Amino acid sequence: MKFEKSLLCIGVTLALSACGGSDSSSQGNSGGTGNDYEFCSVEYQNEQFFEYMKEDYFWADQLQDSLDPEAFDDVYAVLEELRVPEDRYSYILTEEEYDQLFVTATYYGFGFSMEQVSASRVKIRFVYDGSPAATAGMERADEILAIDGVPVSELLANGEFNAALGPNEQGLSREITWEKPDGTEQTELLSKVEVETNTVMGAQTYQVDSETVGYFALDSFINRTGDDLNTAFDLFATQGVDHLVIDVRYNGGGLIRYANQISTQTAGTNVQGKTFLQYRFNEQNSELNETLPFSLVDGVEQLNLDRVFILTTGSSCSSSEIIINSLKPHIEVVTVGQPTCGKPVGQQPEELCDKVTFAINFETVNSEGEGKYYDGLAPDCSVEDQLVADWGSSEDPLTAAANTYISTGSCPAAASAAIKKSAQERSFVKPILNMKDKRESLQ
């Protein structure tokens, strides 16, 4: 398994996650203790991981001097022992989990992601292109009413909702009833197939005051993202857009190179030849510090815009934040929505037997040395996200606020107060922040 320098981001527990990419793997016993543990035993993995952390962890100078490999049940427990208070992001995947999330980008399911928006309601967050859900006509903001005739409210009350959808196995079928935002209902028998997870959604153009606006939502930064971005930017170049809205409200991050590509395709000649990002490692690895220029990467078309609108929430993390931070010294960036997650650090994946570890080992700053936004990046227009309309719709609060700014040159008057939800409804919203949640939200 080979890794490149990148920022692979999937959250951990209640926190957000991670980043990565290098070419190394752990072989043989560590030289620090002299113990001769069986290769890839629990003790071996615990010892190897500790030695790695002492060398490469961004906060290595805060770690203890020694660790007993036999005192921990597994390497996951070692990570929790070593994690410093600042670190909300380090995590560990199995090789299978890594491959499913970042390489093959497929899974067996109906092809939609869900969000529980109250104690008794579930809505569609997004639908993958070409999936059974898309073919049936499901769209973002549709509400699931029943599964095999049993109301969702009843399934949730009895803790049976996930079981009712069944395991993600090819050929498994369920009759699903859903309601569109306009109140119309539809019932279809859906069968699970292997779904390919496109990363760009809702790419389109529309008019605001006789000017053309390009819009797309970006779900993640994985291996196929470069091609997905090209499809969107080909559309924008053909249509000759005057403004661009990039929606990363649910994007937990991913490969840094595609944050670079999207930034460069957006700003074009305004940024080419300039610094996109600086990597900064711990003091003992300072020779690895690197300056990364803006680059089209896999990109073809560029828009040469001097302003971009970016839609964010607390689920906008890592590489999503890098787009904002790296572009701000060079063009006008107008952020609309809610504060981002706050992850100005990253990691290079490291193989450890049948696992891939993602321990934080560098921070990122822009061309002016600005970073350390652990409290998140505050929006210019504060608007609360609501799952009420499809991607790019003028009924969507964040998109509508961006359109108002395009039209008037300022945030809508209501933005500072934000659009209200009841406290009860807010408490039930479950954003996809970590790997487990991301997998379980997909059907």
Image (cartoon, rainbow, N blue to C red):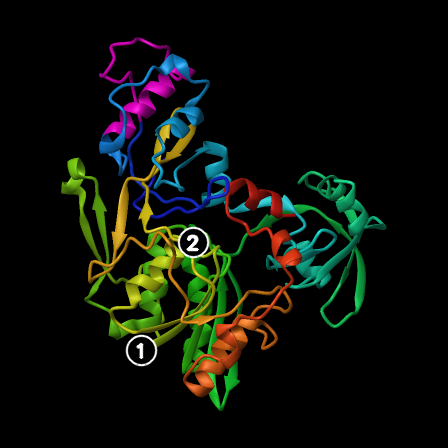
Type of the residue with mark 2: Cys
Residue 425 seen by the camera: yes
Q: What is the x, y in percent for residue 218?
A: 48, 61
Q: What is the x, y in percent for residue 289?
A: 18, 46
Q: Quadrant of residue 392 in the image?
A: bottom right
As helix, strand or loop, the secondary structure at mark 2 comes to loop
Instruction: Say which quadrant the N terminus sits in.
Output: top left
Q: What is the x, y in percent for residue 21?
A: 32, 42
As helix, strand or loop, the secondary structure at mark 1 comes to loop
Mark 2 or 1, nearer chain start: 1
Residue 8, compared with residue 74, is above or below; it is below
Q: Residues within 10 Å of mark 2 (few under 14, many from 20)?
A: many
Residues shaded magenta: 26-54
What residue sits right under mark 1 in the picture?
A: 306
Q: Quadrant of residue 440 in the image?
A: top right
Residue 232, compared with residue 75, is above or below; it is below
Q: Residues within 10 Å of mark 1 (few under 14, many from 20)?
A: some
Disc ID at residue 341? 2
